[in-house]
Amino acid sequence: MGTVHARSLDPLPMQGPELGVQADDMDLGEPEQEEKQEVLENKDVVVQHVHIDGLGRTKEDILTYEVADVFRAKNLIDVMKKSHEARQKLLRLGIFRHVEVVIDTTEGADALPNGLDVTFEVKELRRMTGSYNTMVGNNEGSMVLGLKLPNVFGRAEKLTFQFSYGTKETSYGLSFFKPQPGHFERNFSINLYKVTGQFPWSSLRETDRGVSTEFSFPIWRTNHTLKWEGVWRELGCLARTASFSVREESGHSLKSSLSHTMVIDTRNSTILPRKGALLKINQELAGYTGGDVSFLKEDFEIQLNKTLFWDSVRCCGGNYCLCLFIAVFYLGGPTSVRGYSMYSIGPQSEGDYLGGEAFWAGGLHLYTPLPFRPGRGGFGELFRTHFFLNAGNLCNLNYGEGPRAHLSKLAECIRWSYGAGIVLRLGNIARLELNYCIPMGVQSGDRICDGVQFGAGIRFL
Amino acid sequence: MSLAAEAFVSQIAAAEPWPEKATLYQPLKEDQILLSDSASSLAVQTFLRMCGLPVQVSCCANAEYMSPSGKVPFIHVGNQVVSELGPIVQFIKAKGHSLSDGLDDVQRAEMKAYMELVNNMLLTAELYIQWCDDYTATEISRPRYSSPYSWPLNHILAYQKQWEVRRKMNAIGWSGKSLEQVYEDVSQCCQALSQRLGTQPYFFNKQPTELDALVFGHLFTILTTQLTNDELAEKVKSYTNLLSFCHRIDQTYFKEHDRESQVS
């Protein structure tokens, strides 16, 4: 460690500032007390060298893109601003533990009087980090092993591996991520996984083994992702008492699908945002690239947040999904239409919920800080009280009729609920909710959970 | 569900009469079903015809996975799903139909012993020939078993099934046997059956029992299924009374019955 990489103006492929000497830069030798203010604001400077200290396996060519902007700074404030931005860019590569910036005057034979040297002192992440946990829950114990290799080949590639060995099920995931040098938002990743899940509301057990590759790239202000996925799915019954409709679904199937997602996200946080909006549109087409499952799936999601008076936030959101030929959607539960049991809305057979081909759901929330603001500025900030109104409907499509009939079918028998509760934000990842719900518009066959309902998750309506 | 609860539920179910829409599920007849499954399915169908209970045969590619025990065939009667001949016989007995009521204890024990013989010898030999003989496995079993699925799932599932059967053969000690020895075992089993049958119409004289259904299922399927060679069928054909036994049951319960239902 401690290799110093100096970059000066000429050999770089990008443009650097001119070497011309400015007229008013000869004042550097004058008494500094009076000129301190001047130096900071008006002084034109030239960034002569940018050093990156502390590189080991990282290749320099990806870093030059991130720090190139620093050379374009004209005065000291600019240098500080652009160095800060370059630091953010270096950190978002995910290969450094921390990055420090040092700005100093140039020294040496080729030093200009107004020349500056900017040094980024970086500490790379370790070559491999691992974790080992044991988990107990849901009548199952398991051992989880995780391995992460950041910056595998020196250009911010990341390899992660997770393996979970349990008393009932085993699952694993292997993922390789590579960004394009110079354009971190353009990247591709390859994933290999096996996941198992149990769904008691449908008496179904599912094992998916799959491989997927995805490309992400930004276009103007939107982020697009193209993905191909191949999945071998195995379905089985969870109990001998599973309904026959569920039993008929048991067996193996192969899905090969192409999907495209467009996301515009201007929110300031994914959990409990205070402002901003989210628009996400996703299409998935399966069956044309092999496999024995064919369907077309559409998914629209929108969320708008606005801060109102007294620190409260109004959030309204909606979600509409449609799938041709297969019933894959479930609705209900503490993460979607509150007041109903988990995924317990819609067509069912002998107590098992079969899901539907289309659904819509919407919510209107008002988040306020806790009354009387206990723990203000600290722990209390993680909590919010929230008042909500949720509505939604799930149904199967009728292929003979047109879109108007489909819309009217979704508009009849709407399930909705309202209530209030407390929300706790867990880091930046998840959220816990404890609500008092009053479900309305309940249809026969739905299972409700009126009164107190607890929910934990990542994506909430 | 606990054992007590299951027993309670099956008691309740047993009280219901045989519905119109009882269905028997098996793999696809033309392209997918293999010799051993076909034999088991025919045995159950014969048993139900002997009891006079109507049943519809439905072919599904995923019948093996739908079955609660993983084996075909299985029947869906009212709310109940029961698989394999043994449990089905019990289930039908609880509904009040039985073919072996007229037997005394000694005969019943003998019947059970012969059924075990057929299961341990004939069925195992069928599985061996299908999956442990490389030529048959490559030419017939794997392509047929995986026909409903697309690439690469078809290869994965076929090999998975082959490994599973070979492991089972290993466990019961059949993996050391050669094909010739297996044919010999089949011949000996047929000899035992032939001796028991003698000149009687059915194994227990005048009335057919579940043993007759089981033997018919296996022997008729062996005689009418095309394998890579005819050795297995030849072994059965060498016992003439077994041949006429199969012919008789086919005439009585299948051809006559179908003709009657066409006329009426």
Image (tube, grey):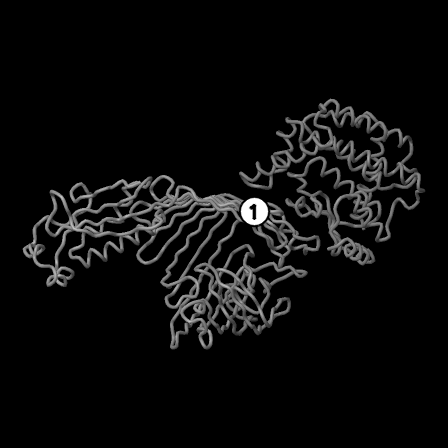
Q: Is residue A55 above or below residue B179?
A: below
How far across and down, in percent of the image, does residue A62 sit? 29, 44
Q: Quadrant of the N terminus of chain B?
A: bottom right
How far across and down, in percent of the image, does residue A217 sit? 35, 51
- Mark 1 Cα shell of 10 Å, populated few (<14), some (14-19), many (≥20): some
Viewer-closest of B222 and A448: A448
Q: Which residue is mark 1?
A: A143
Viewer-closest of A107 and B84: A107
In the figure, is residue A333 to the left or right of B67?
Answer: left
Mark 1 secondary-structure assignment? strand
What chain letter is assigned to the residue under label 1?
Answer: A
Residue shown at the point (60%, 53%) measured from the top left: A198
Viewer-closest of B29 and A262: A262
The answer to whether residue A211 is seen in the rendering is no
In the figure, is residue B73 to the left or right of A275?
Answer: right
How far across and down, in percent of the image, does residue B93 sit? 85, 50
Quarter assignment of residue A444: bottom right
Residue shown at the point (56%, 61%) measured from the top left: A396
